Amino acid sequence: MDAIRVRGQRQLHGTIPVGGAKNAALPILCATLLSDGTSHLKNVPGLRDINTTAELLGVLGRKTSVQIPEVTVGPSTGAFVEAPYELVRQMRASVLVLGPLLARHGKAKVSLPGGCAIGARPVDQHLKGLEALGATIRVEHGYIEAEAPRLRGAEIVFDLPTVTGTENIMMAAALAKGRSTLVNCAREPEVEELGRVLNKMGAKVDGAGTSVIHITGADELAPFEHAVIADRIEAGTFMAAVGLAGGSILLEHAPIDDLEPVIVKLRKAGLTIEREGDGARVERLGPLLPVDVTTAPHPGFPTDMQAQFMALMTLAGGRSVLTETIFENRFMHVPELSRMGARIETRHNTALVEGVKGLSGASVMATDLRASASLVIAGLVAEGETIVRRVYHLDRGYESIEKKLGRAGADIERISLEGP
Ligand code: EPU
């Protein structure tokens, strides 16, 4: 089994390129199902989740060729409408095929994603939205079965902002008859990006990226070409890495505007972050300072950066309080960071981090993508050797993290370990 080995206490210097955004690419790949023809994506990151989605599109009758950084989704070869458990269980975002399949074929059968390591993650808002558009939905034998001869525009008020829920309903509404109004939508940049793609396809989407989205559906949508936006979470992870390791990095293509909520906190923690070229120059010159953070839907502080920010706070000069409000079980990095010498106490959804003088390398692992990333960046500053196991979590969301950090001066490599 692969692991990442980091030998710590080396500063980062040079340039790190930020790739395309995983959480933008996944819904866009699912949006290809809304049209018959061949669609072409550029700036797609080389990740396990992209391969899983390509496999799923293949099962749904669309021959998909992945040649990173490009993906081509071929023409429809029939009305294949079932997303099997085997693929959905590997990646919850597979539920994003539900809206497109139902809207285009009048029916869909998609495995219920179930919970995952970070929380229960229900999909009730997705189902409620589709029902409002006229679908009949049954949940049986672990599958969502949805039917509707033709979806009809409706007003939908989400009970809470959900990223993939908003995206699923946007895609369904794009092929529904008439106009839909979606209220209390997720405002993440990835939702805005999907709105741009649906407009390219011929739908009329107005307000994506705000909490109210108006969509006028089309009878048919066209295939498209699109270059995916840069990954704000990958960029934020490298910023936190510089905060821990020290040094000066030019983060090429870093989407600095999308990262504002994170950058505000990183600056308070003592980092210097300035726009440079199409990215950002990141440095840490002085000591790390403690900063409190509460995760919230965009434009709040993203839950996907909470673990990496906590790693940073383990070395701040004082106590910081980190509160997780999105997912109920997203502190899996805490016991592992503690094994590296961090002082963290958790109470319900709050972590109290008491900064320490230094971390020490250890063998660690986590069962969540962002938790794993936090352990890698903690390893960059720890004394001695850190082995991060279960690298397949990292491979879901970070393209060649060891190569990108290695080229910037980190002593890091992928190794093979005996046994599980
Ligand atoms: N929720 C419901 N009902 C629903 C949908 C969501 O109660 O029908 C709750 C969730 O349980 C959670 C909150 O709403 O408490 C927000 O969840 P959301 O639906 O926004 O999350 P998601 O769409 O499943 C996406 C990202 C996650 C990211 C979250 C929050 C994708 C493919 N995934 O998930 O990314 O953490 O939004 O920003 O876009 C990651 O990349 O590591 C990752 C987990």
Image: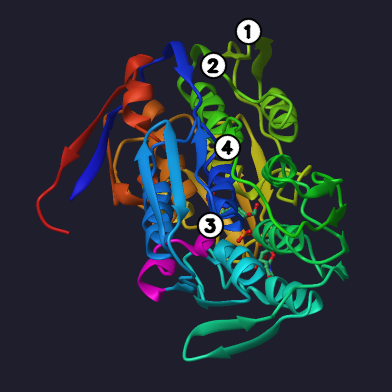
Q: Quadrant of ligand 1?
A: bottom right
Q: Residues within 10 Å of mark 2 (few under 14, many from 20)?
A: some
Q: Which labelled disc corresponds to residue 277?
A: 1
Q: Secondary structure at mark 4?
A: helix
Residue type, mark 2 in image: Glu
Q: Could you classify mark 3 by the number of other residues whose Cα lies within 10 Å: few (under 14), some (14-19), or many (20 or more)?
A: many
Residue 181 placement, left or right of 317: right
Q: Residues within 10 Å of mark 4 (few under 14, many from 20)?
A: many
Mark 4 belongs to which amino acid? Ile
- Mark toward the start of the polypeptide (2 vs 1): 2
Q: In this orientation, does residue 378 appear?
A: no
Q: Is residue 86 part of the magenta span, yes or no? A: yes
Residue 331: numbered disc: 3
Q: Give the left or right position of residue 161, taking residue 38 as reference.
A: right
Residue 2 position by quadrant = top left
Instruction: Classify mark 1: helix, strand or loop.
Output: loop
Q: Is residue 188 visible?
A: yes
Q: Nearer the viewer, residue 280 or 166?
A: 166
Sequence-first tag of 1 and 4: 4
Which is in the foreground here, disc 4 or disc 2?
A: 2
State yes or no: discs 1 and 4 in contact (Cβ < 8 Å).
Answer: no
The residue shown at (74%, 60%) is 219
**Above/below status of 285 relative to 138:** above
Q: Is the CB of mark 4 within 8 Å of ligand 1?
A: yes
Seen at 31% across and 36% down, the residue is 361
